[in-house]
Amino acid sequence: LFSESNSRRAVNRGYLGGLLRLYRDWHRNDVSNNYICIRRGLLLCLKHMTNIKLGRETFLGSQGMEILFTSVQDYLSCKNLDPIVNTVTQILRKCYPKESLPVAKVRSSYSFPLPGNAKDGPACEVSEGKRLKGDYESDGEEEAENDLDNEEVDSKEEDYYDLETDVNKLRSRPVLDRPEVELQQYEAMCPELSHSFQELESETEEEKVLEDRTESLPFTPSHFIPSATSVKHINCIWRNQTVTEMGLDPGEKDFKVSRQSWTKEEKCTGDQTDKKRDIAEAAQDTDAHEEEYPARSPVLNLRPLPKDAAWYQKVLYPECDTSINPNPGGRLDHSDIVTNLLERHQGDIPFHSPGFYMARAKSVKSIPDYKDLAFPDFWGHQAPPYSKPLLERKHGVQRDKVLDDVRRLIQPDDVIGRTVFDLDEPSHSSPGAPGCLTFFSKFESGNLRKAIQVREFEYDLLMNADVNSSQHHQWFYFEVRDMKFAVPYRFNIINCEKLNSQFNYGMQPVMYSVKEALQGRPRWVRAGHDICYYKNHYRSSAVGEGGGTRGKFYYTLTFSIKFPHKDDVCYLAYHYPYTYSTMMSHLDSLEQNRNPKKVYWRQQTLCQTLGGNLCPLLTITAMPESKKREDLEQFCNRPYVFLIARVHPGESNASWVMKGTLEFLVSSDPIADLLRKCFIFKIVPMLNPDGVING
């Protein structure tokens, strides 16, 4: 039966039905499990015969799904029978009828007219509504699944023809790879080389000595970092700088600088002038965008929390008998809620202010035109007080989830199938139905396209694809409310695309509880149990949808969560979220808290995105010791270090690494001070703002 021709011949002669009857007889009579090898041998024959389409059709017609599913229900807790259970699960998973995703179209709910395109929407959109009950895998396609609990993705071997590294290729070239005239366009990105440092004149020598004495630390860093004076370049060019602007040291009359023609308006006269100019440029860019998109008004509100005054009385003031004064009907206005929250905020989250964040978020441009703020981003969060190890995977969890999916097919009576959230067709959803959760994701970086209630405490979720695309389903971030206390809710994200995931190796989603935050514990925590990631029975049926491939399989990420409070408002995410507004407000806080006499900081606009958001470019280095020639020369000769993050919007961990890097570089740590004196850091903290904003 290993060959396709033998399998087809056996199916045509009716052997498949006979094997099913024979297996069922052995299952009924082998009560002491003495003949496991014989029973598994029969299953292996069925497995080979169902590798072809004809075999799978015959298997379904012979009630094979029901027979095998019923036979393993009593064996799930017995490890000695794992060979039988695993083989049965593989057969059931392979023969499950393939379906398209339960969405009208696979393409993203959001579309954006790209410059130069005649049409606003995508060129090709094919309906995905039709089910594929009779659509199977091609003949001869067999799943290599020897152990469902330890699925591994086989790595493809590659031929390496050159195992030696040519060191000469790593050395810098003696000449420029582009004409110098072409490289001059990047001078606008290096305004620090034309800075006049007028602020250094106002600092007296006594103040400088006192400051050095105050900030010096009594130890020397053990890390080896080259000294600032040892960093020299042969060709020193003070771009756009004249002798008059810089001022020559009296003892260095013979030092010559190439003089360039400058108009008075182009001269850089100090840090305050630079800052005002940058703010004016940013405001000009914002005004220009608002003129281009006049319909987008910066109206933004905090996500509405339960407006019952008793809820706030219990959460905000559990120890107090006095009540919050509600409006008639026991409801609170949104302004009253925000006012109470801001008064409640302890301000103990470094570099975060709720009011500051809300002000920044109002200027964000999004394709769906977000009107709401997610509570975790508004309120902020503290680091967990302890490190949490990877979750130990429960034995047999993946096959149990696969069997639960099979139960839907053969026992459909208990399947609710009610849509409770839908980005595409909000009118077709029934949010707030009795006994079901309420979902929401239309906020910055949010991603949840559809939620379907399968059973009372189980939901199928679908993520939204990238804008103008039908691919890249990984990041999720959504709100859920109206839950019951200590009840395990199961969530199945059914349109994942990657072949494997860290969720199979101990990773957990993160959860944020509003009640916990208002009680003094504002934290994202790792949560969830019975977590696994596996290939499901959904696949793409359309061709040409934004690069979609016919027959592409989807994967399910499933996890169960017990919420800590009843009727709470919680947020679930793939990883700790970090929004564009968080980054911009963080940069503002860093600039305000830095030491301007020690840290040179400049924030420019690298570009304006297609969505109309500004992409910041930071320059961080140490201020020169003085305006003497050798100090200014050392400043201009510092080598550049380029750092970028968030090229892929779904990798929010990169932003947290960048956040810590920025805070360290502007700190008073002696190593940070030495790094600033040795290098000029050019940093793009978020290279894809639109992707981050739109989730």
Image: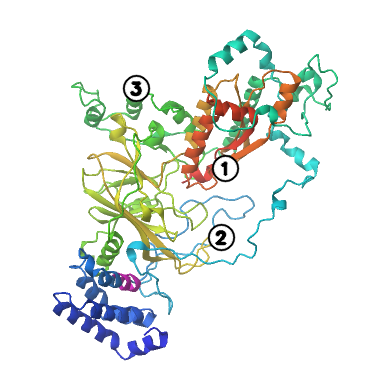
At label 3, counting other C-alpha atoms closer than 10 Å, the crowd grade (few under 14, some 14-19, many 20 or more) is few
Specify the amino acid type for callout 2.
Ala
Horizontal placement of 307 versus 297: left or right? left
Color style of the picture: rainbow
For the residue pair 631 and 245, the one nearer the viewer reads as 631
Above/below status of 528 relative to 239? below
Res. 625 image quadrant? top right
Q: Nearer the viewer, residue 361 or 80?
A: 80
Magenta region, residue range = 89-95
| Residue on which the image places disc 2 | 123
- Tell me: residue 502, above or below residue 35: above
Side of 84 relative to 595 (left or right)? left
List x then y, in percent, for residue 308.
24, 32
Depicted 626 relative to depicted 415: above or below: above
What residue did someone put label 1 on?
687
Point 86% across, 20% down: residue: 254
How many neighbours does mark 1 have within 10 angstroms: few (below 14), some (14-19), or many (20 or more)? many
Horizontal placement of 317 versus 614: left or right? left
Q: Nearer the viewer, residue 80 or 431?
A: 80
C-alpha separation, residue under disc 1 versus residue under disc 3: 35 Å
State the residue at coordinates (59%, 42%).
Answer: 609
Q: In front: mark 1 or mark 3?
A: 1
User: What is the quadrant of the N terminus in the image?
Assistant: bottom left
| Residue ID for mark 3 | 343
What's under tag 3, amino acid-wise?
Glu
Query: What residue occupies the far bottom of the structure in this picture?
Result: 13
| Dot 1 amino acid type | Leu
